[in-house]
Amino acid sequence: QTMRDADAVVRNARRALRRATGPSGQAKGRLHRALDELDTTLERTRRVVAQTRTRLGGQVPDSATRLVSLHDPDARPIRKGRLGKPVEFGYKAQVVDNADGVILDHNVEIGNPADAPQLAPAIERITRRTGRPPRAVTADRGYGEASVERDLHDLGVRSVAIPRKGKPGAARRELEHRRAFRDKVKWRTGSEGRINHIKRSYGWNRTELTTITGARTWCGYGVFAHNLTKIGPWQRQKPRRGGPCPPDPVTRTQTKHQPHPPSRRPTLFRSK
């Protein structure tokens, strides 16, 4: 009954607005937008009611399509396994930085896609922008698949230091215990500090824009501002002989989630 009453209110308001002679220009445009927003909210509310009835009927709605937030329809459930919050809602983001602290690539995706398939495309984008592949790439165990390592070598990466998933064989254990491999893996942990820094200082802890387009825009501006503060001091330094030295082409990768509680604006957290 409440939904029918709300629909009637919208219909009557649109009818009255068409007949009205008073509001014009910007005022009339604002009224139209307010009615469009109300109409959108009603449609989303219908979806939530239908999902609730499905759940009460003993079925679990499809997590890939179900609506979890009236505020942000693109937000998706993300299972993280924490004791206090086993499931959060939002997006998943990936950050690739280098030894100079410059973020070379980032992306924000709907839901909780697997880490491994995202790494090679990121390195390919970096290679296209800089004109050469990174000398070495390191990432956490979530990217540890043989296919990922092959793809990175095919892109021209000479050294890949990513611990493999599961129990490694004797040859793999020997490789992962080498000093060079372990040093790169230890260096990767520095990306945790990079994540905390952009969360605290560049808005990645909470996006003020909704939908996947808004989240990508917000995160992009944060990365842009972060890189400006990193690169700016280099411009004030005396140029080296033969021109400025390009950033060290060694990259590390880290993923994080952007949970979005239905009653709050989206928030960014990292994912181990």
Image (tube, rainbow, N blue to C red):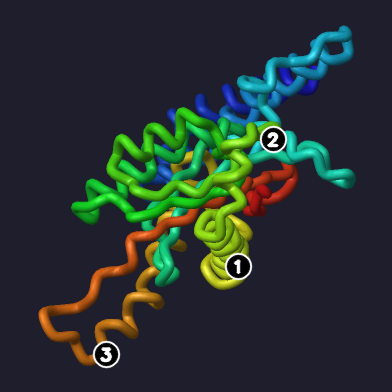
Residue 237 bears which disc, if any? 3
100, above or below 232, in the image: above
Residue 145: x and y in percent read 54, 32
Residue 172: x and y in percent read 58, 38
Q: Earlier in the sequence, mark 2 or mark 3?
A: 2
**What residue is disc 1 on?**
193
131, above or below 111, in the image: below
Identified at 14% across, 79% down, the residue is 243
49, above or below 124, in the image: above
**Residue 244, picture quadrant:** bottom left
The answer to whether the residue labelled 2 contacts the one labelled 3, judged by CB atoms less than 8 Å apart, is no
Residue 78 bears which disc, if any? 2
Q: Earlier in the sequence, mark 2 or mark 1?
A: 2
Residue 191: x and y in percent read 56, 61
Q: CA distance from mark 3 to mark 1?
A: 25 Å
Q: Residues within 10 Å of mark 3 (few under 14, many from 20)?
A: few
Tell me which amino acid carries mark 1: Gly
> Farthest residue toward the left?
242
